[in-house]
Image (cartoon, grey):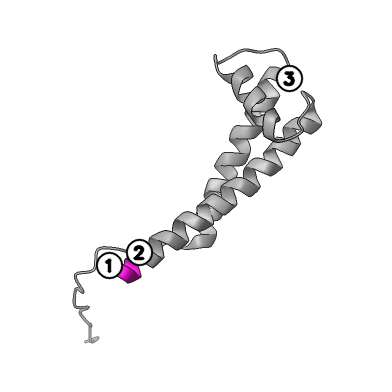
Amino acid sequence: MAKTTVREPTGDLHYKLHWKAWAATIGLIGGIDMFLHVLIPTFGFELLWWNNIMYQLISTFFPLSMTIGGAFLALGMGALCGAVCGWLFATVHNKMLEWFN
């Protein structure tokens, strides 16, 4: 018969977050969100009431134009900003686990 090992529970319910996974996930979501906020008003669609307002807000901080190129520029900026935010979230979460555990 094969010997089985039983793992003792540690009682630790908090797990460390992998910063690369969080950076990629939030970067993808942020990039697609900004891409759509520029692309939808580019073609004259007003699917949601805040698309024009969001485009104006984004273009206040970043030089965007209502073109396909501007939409891809917004995709890159959203991915970069989202990746930094995801990395910061995972890093702060893991540091707080070390401090309070």
- Can you give x and y, in whole percent of width and height, for residue 63 in the image? 77, 33
For label 2, the SS is helix
Residue at label 1?
Answer: 100
Asked whether residue 97 is drawn in magenta, I would say yes
Point out residue 43 in the picture as x, y percentages from the top left corner: 73, 16
Q: Which mark is residue 42?
A: 3
Which amino acid, mark 1?
Answer: Phe
Q: Amino acid at mark 3?
A: Thr
Q: Height in image: 90 above or below 41? A: below
Instruction: Check if mark 2's residue and mark 1's residue have beta carbons within 8 Å.
Output: yes
Q: Earlier in the sequence, mark 2 or mark 3?
A: 3
Q: Nearer the viewer, mark 2 or mark 3?
A: 2
* Residue that badge 2 annotates: 96
Q: Secondary structure at mark 3?
A: helix
Q: In the rendered picture of this protein, how many numbered marks are placed on residues? A: 3
The span shown in magenta is: 96-101
Count neighbours of disc 3 (C-alpha within 10 A) and say few if under 14, some if 14 to 19, many if 20 or more.
Answer: some
Whether residue 16 can be seen here: no
Of mark 3 and mark 1, the one earlier in the sequence is 3
Quarter containing the N terminus: bottom left
Number of residues whose C-alpha sits closer than 10 Å to that of mark 2, classed few (under 14), some (14–19) or many (20 or more): few
What distance separates the C-alpha of mark 2 from that of mark 3?
A: 43 Å
**With 39 as the anchor, is 16 left or right in this view?**
left
Counting from the top left corner in percent of width and height, residue 18 is at 47, 63
Q: Is residue 32 above or below residue 20?
A: above
